[in-house]
Amino acid sequence: MRHPGQSSAGTSENARGHIRDQALALGFDAVGFAGPDVGDAAGRLGEFIASGYHGDMGWMETTQVRRESPRGLWPEVKSIIAVGMNYGPDEDPLMLREYPDRAVVSAYARGRDYHDVLKKQLRQLASRIAADWSCEVKLFVDTAPVMEKPIAQQGGLGWQGKHTNLVSRDFGSWLFLGEVFTTLDLEPDLPGRDHCGGCHRCIDACPTAAFPEPYKLDARRCISYLTIEHDGHIPREFRIPMGNRIYGCDDCLAVCPWNKFAKTTPHDALRPHIHLRRPRLRDFAALDDAGFRQVFSGSPVKRLGRDRFVRNVLIAISNSGDGALADSAGALLADPSPLVRAMAVWALARLLPATAFADLRTEHAGAEADPDVREEWAAG
């Protein structure tokens, strides 16, 4: 008699078909099966960290050993069910770059927090697998040191393109990923093949030249990293290239030719909230902490925190060229956060006539206690 969690070839195929049907019925749009390995991704991760490309993301270094292999996270894992959920936008995510008084939020963050959406469905899938096949399961949605994109590639969901993100032949750039680790022994799918060919549109599109070479990303130069992961002041060399991007950057994703096969998400929870379709920079700059929490309740943007969010908004205001937005920046010169005050100074230095800015500097700079803010006054 077969031990629970063990499977013959026939039973493996039955389990695969049953699990795939359940996953699709629960709302996932792509399903694949992988073994407990990540191919050559472990070596690439080591190079990424050794080069310092991870920047402030120290957790990538501290979890490197566990991240290099699914067995390092859970020694008992035998198979991984990789799932994807389509979050394809219903309009060009780069369109708002042409409206400098508006804020660009990455397509993935315009709806409900995908961690919550996927985890709810993934829990149901994992519970059914455990009950139907008498096996152990663990589920992950970007919540543990799991190399999701290499696992998705191993499971045949797509391939990691030259921009290091997953590309799908069916959904282009727009798949959220999740995984169920299991002790059930399942036949893996064939890994996804690289179909980038000679294309380098994603590399050319990057506003900050964050790709030192194809398939390698220097996160320290990436607008997504700078606006979301980076805690402190954004280096001056990247502020102007940020344009009006205040949370993430879709440029390398959006220009991928494989998006011609992409489909608008069918999932209501992942569709853009009305206040994130064409948000005004002026409105976002006026948010205090309570207002920020209210506006972004249930959104991944909320994890950024109000101060870093307004930091990004002020950089976008500085890039607008719209002198009418100087009032929004000026109102933040007395903000409790030195991070916000510093970027208010930066914005005013770029929006106001030199004489008006000089008058403000005389009025405020001498009373400023924070050295970083004083530096912005001096540089302005």
Image (tube, rainbow, N blue to C red):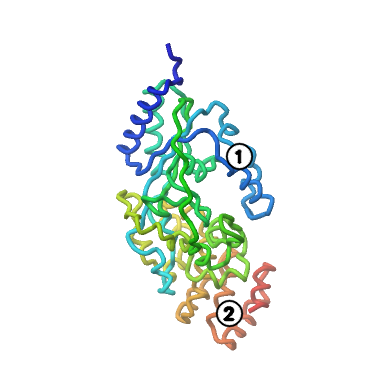
**Position of residue 81 measured from the top left corner of the image (x, y, whole percent):** 44, 35
Kind of residue at disc 2: Ala
Q: Secondary structure at mark 1?
A: loop
Q: Residue at x 52, y 28 (%)?
A: 77
Tell me which corner region of the image, top left, top right, bottom left or bottom right, holds residue 291. bottom left
Location of residue 195 with respect to 371 vertically, above or below: above
Tell me which corner region of the image, top left, top right, bottom left or bottom right, holds residue 111. bottom left
Kind of residue at disc 1: Glu
Location of residue 68 with respect to 108 vertically, above or below: above
Q: Find the distance from the CA under tag 1 to the CA under tag 2.
A: 46 Å
Q: Is residue 307 visible?
A: no
Which quadrant, please, contains the C terminus? bottom right
Q: Residue furthest bottom?
A: 355
The residue wearing badge 2 is: 349
As drawn, is 312 to the left or to the right of 19?
right
Q: Residue at x 54, y 83 (%)?
A: 352
The residue wearing badge 1 is: 68
Q: Nearer the viewer, residue 192 or 73?
A: 192
Q: Residues within 10 Å of mark 2 (few under 14, many from 20)?
A: many
Q: Residues within 10 Å of mark 1 (few under 14, many from 20)?
A: many
Which quadrant, please, contains the N terminus? top left
**Position of residue 378 measured from the top left corner of the image (x, y, whole percent):** 68, 77
